Amino acid sequence: MKPISYAAALAEFEQEVWAIAPKALQTMRDALTRGGDGVAAQPAAVARFQDQQPARDAAVGVLPLVGPISHRPTAWQSIYGGPVLMKWVDQLQLMTTNPSIRGIVIDIDSPGGTVGGVEEAGQAIAEAARKKPVIAVANTTTASAAYWLASQASKVLMMPSAGVGSVGVYSLHMDFSRALDKAGVTPTFIYAGRNKVDGNPFEPLTDEAKRDEQRIVDFYYDAFVKAVANGRGLSESWVRDKMADGRMHNVKSAVGLRFVDGVVSGLSQAIAMTAETNSGRFAHANRLSECELLKLEMDSL
């Protein structure tokens, strides 16, 4: 397999708008930056999350969503692996249309990822949930874009040690102008179009460029809030005030704030619940009233 250039991966990485846990993004960026010193990455050697294959247990399809999320393969995605939504949605739709599969469990351990393709993938999950039970399981990290997707399922469950949330969107601008000054380097852009080079990394971000970038971030944030509100059967005001502040939550606060419907001891319990239910049991119901059905025993946590 052809090695991937860390420099090329970093260039792609910094053009993205992210719905991801900030610590995860920083870890990824630091690794790409350190690897840029003349080193090429061998994807097969470093990708932790490649070749995520759906599985079946009796009549239940288990679809992993593990690692940083991207819309399509890129240089940075080839290094880190993780679900490519274009392919992941294809697997979801195959399970949805397969009459022998009565329900789907989405097994999630992801810090989130880029915003591209997430809204469409969420709509695909919602469509699947109208046809058969789709249960998203936080096993364990389900942050940002990963929670955006989870919120569209019929049910969201979490492991006792899981964390969910980080509802928010951001982008990152790196200003290398002072470092270039010290190195005696002066970049000069030759361009047409007043805002064509706004946000470039070789000069400070202008107020106008910052406002434009904020508008982009706000657009995706609004879409995120609306998706969670629709998927969880909540008001947008509740989601904005209680859920969409970027924080992660453990099991006690996650249930109280309606991020999740209940707690399961493991993936096998979620699979068993899905196998036992019929196609209408979990869909379009009041989630709080179903906590007893899910045997949620918060006092024991």
Image (cartoon, rainbow, N blue to C red):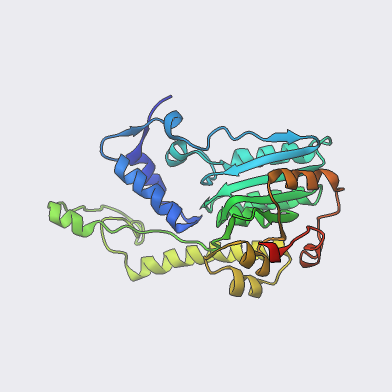
In which quadrant of the rendered view does residue 201 lie?
bottom left
Q: Is residue 185 above or below residue 217?
A: above
Residue in front for this viewpoint, 167 or 297: 297
Residue in front for this viewpoint, 282 or 116: 282
Q: Position of residue 106 (x, y in %)?
A: 68, 46
In which quadrant of the rendered view does residue 165 lie?
bottom right
- Residue shown at the point (65%, 63%) measured from the top left: 259
Q: Position of residue 210 (x, y in %)?
A: 38, 67
The extreme top residue here reads 1
Count of numbered circles on the image: 0
Residue 14 seen in render? no
Q: Position of residue 254 (x, y in %)?
A: 63, 64
Residue in front for this viewpoint, 285 or 205: 285
Specify the quadrant that holds the C terminus. bottom right
- Residue shown at the point (63%, 70%) measured from the top left: 239
Q: Position of residue 267 (x, y in %)?
A: 69, 45
Specify the quadrant that holds the N terminus. top left
Q: Is residue 179 above or below residue 286?
A: above
- Residue shown at the point (43%, 59%) measured from the top left: 171
Residue in front for this viewpoint, 298 or 278: 298
Does 32 sit left or right of 243 as displayed?
Answer: left
Residue 261 seen in render? yes
In which quadrant of the rendered view does residue 174 lie?
bottom left
Does 224 sit left or right of 199 as displayed?
Answer: right
Q: Is residue 214 above or below residue 134?
A: below
